[in-house]
Image (spheres, helix red, strand yellow):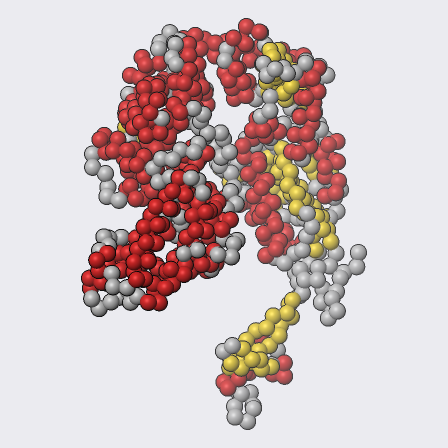
Amino acid sequence: MLERFDSFGFRWGGKLRDFLLEIGTEELPASYLDMALEWLSSKASRRLEELRLSHGKILSWGTPRRIALVVEDVAEVQPDREEEVLGPPERVAFDERGNPTKAAVGFAKAQGVSLEELKVVDTPKGRYVSVTRRSLGSSAREILASEVPNWIRELPFPKSMRWGELELKFARPIRWIVALWGDQVLDFQLDSIRSGRTTFGHRFMSPNGAEVPSPRHYLEICRSLKVLVDPGERSKRILEESEKAARALGGRVLEDPDLLKTVVNLVEYPVIVVGRFSEEFLELPREVLVTVMKEQQKFFGLEDSQGNLLPHFISVANICPPSLETIRRGNERVLKARLSDARFFFKEDQKRRLEERLEKLEGMIFHAKLGTLRQKVERLERLSHLLAQAIAPQAVAKARRAATLCKADLATEMVGEFPTLQGTMGSYYALLQGEDTEVAQAIREHYLPAFSGDRIPAGPVSVVVALADKLDTVAGCFSVGEVPTGAGDPLGVRRAALGILRILLEGGLRASLRSMVRWALDGIESQLGRLKEGVEEEILKFFVIRLENLWISQGHDPAAVSAIVDNALEDLPQAMERLEALERFMGEENFNDLALSFKRVMNIVGDRTPGPVDESLFTQPEERDLMDLVNWTEVTIPKRLAEHDALAAMKELASQRPRIDRFFDKVLVNDPDTRLRSNRLNMLARLASSFLKLADFSKLAGRA
């Protein structure tokens, strides 16, 4: 392909070549691979842009033994460019006769040009001498040979270390590097490893090396070496073969995206192996069977069309021997041992009631400054009682009982072996010992929502205990200075706060979050002693920020959110109704009337607290009319909000703008008489307070 030039004779990139980088390693942990591929792709895109190297698609692939990057259609050279270099001011560079001064001569010499090439240009600071410099683009091959070793060195992993005598720190030892610039080797050396074109195949099925002619041949060469280097291709193969095997057994594979991602990153050439376990293990809770298969063996479970588990599993091997029988028998033998252990734990745990395990929680630390899990349970008992009285009076006794037992399964053998089953096993053990079904459900669900998009707890008892658990965590962490930062949130305070907001919003619970926070802090204070001043407001501000982020992430208008969020925590479902009403109202003509009226009132009132109004001090009919409006708003707005019709309240309030305008036109608010002035300001402050029950329209002034 010919080099390309623009109409001025400048090269803009030259020929286009594909670039390939493959880093061959010892087996990487499955959890390292996705992060490394994402970082490498992002790094390449960012640096190529900074280096002014145009390119096409960027692809990143990987297996446990290799990290690969392909960049298509990279320009062979950087485009040439011109830049304007400013020198001294014209008055300094030339004397009165227009002759160049020493300043001009020095500037020309420094820039490597003749005096004739200097020119004068107008700038915002005045007229300056300048020179236009043309720089030729550098070779992409030279640039990449210098850049790529740095990309490899900078690859981030949860843990890196030096291997052998190499200075390079990496997750695992690097065994080879393939670097191709089109059909040529991009030559560089990283410690003692020199780049080349030889890749290596599957460790067992095709251990020999093979040369890669060009990046376009890379996938094909890898396949010939029994390596599917594209994770998407491996994932598709696993899904298709697993589903085919499951159908043959009259079932379907349990969906588990996380397990699939892990398995994909554990193999280079996936081979499906079907196994079976004894039906007697089906007596174990479903979650136990699935967890043992997933966490200990990385096996997929199967279920029938009714959702019942089948006594079969699917494993993914990283080798294709002449016969899979040996692998199958080995998998079945190991799984039988694991399930036998789980059955033993299940039976042993049932020998003691949950409440008998509370004593063991005294030796389990929740947080060094917040005490043991037993102390947390005591706080949850008290807080659940208060919350139930406020939002579910009929569930007080059950909520307190669930709070007492909700952490007991942390002291069981099963949860000790499988921490992800916390709550789940407590629920099973509670039912087996005769507890109420709502109590058992609350033990299971009080951790919900556990992650973004997870469901919220169902049922009043579950809701109460879930709120109590999360409120105690948030209040406790803020009380002892464990505030989330950009660097980390080890106790999941952000997740707990978001869970509280979602439970209140999606559950339609019209209760005061401020009161809930205060109750939680009272429980913390009773154990720790006096808390630092201002911690309650600090927590509430944190909730406001989380709520603002939540609503904006859901697609709500940021300006409308800002107008609602500060006055939302007393009744979140009502705040949600006001937000939706405001977003609709902002598109109507009389929105301006409401926003301008509020702005006019607030300009006079400021942050004045509403006070008593003495009607005997009225001297003008407009004062009486405004007082009638105040009384009307103080009745109508709460009524409309109770009727879930905030939009009607906004429209009705907007229609009253003429009365507010007449008052300001006819009445001198800041009267020299202090009694009249204070009385009028108190009346306006009450009107502003009514406005604020709907929204802080001052934050929407730019929309008006």
Is 417 placed left or right of 309 in the picture?
A: left
The image position of residue 193, as x and y in percent, is: 61, 41
Q: Nearer the viewer, residue 516 or 211?
A: 516
Residue drawn at x 57%, y 36% is: 34
The image position of residue 556, as x and y in percent, is: 50, 46
Residue 319 drawn above or below residue 655: above
The image position of residue 271, as x and y in percent, is: 68, 22
Outermost residue, right side:
1
Using the rendered image of the protein, determine whether residue 475 is visible from the camera's viewpoint: no
Using the rendered image of the protein, determine whether residue 92 is visible from the camera's viewpoint: yes
Q: Nearer the viewer, residue 552 or 675?
A: 675
The image position of residue 636, as x and y in percent, is: 37, 46
Outermost residue, top side:
280
Q: Nearer the viewer, residue 345 or 25?
A: 345
Residue drawn at x 75%, y 62% is: 4
Residue drawn at x 22%, y 55% is: 614
Residue drawn at x 72%, y 43% is: 215
Is 164 placed left or right of 66 in the picture?
A: left
Q: Quadrant of the N terminus?
A: bottom right
Is 322 placed left or right of 570 in the picture?
A: right
Residue 141 drawn above or below residue 345: below
Report the number of discs.
0
Residue 382 drawn above or below residue 125: above
Outermost residue, bottom side:
97
Residue 319 drawn above or below residue 2: above
Q: Quadrant of residue 2?
A: bottom right
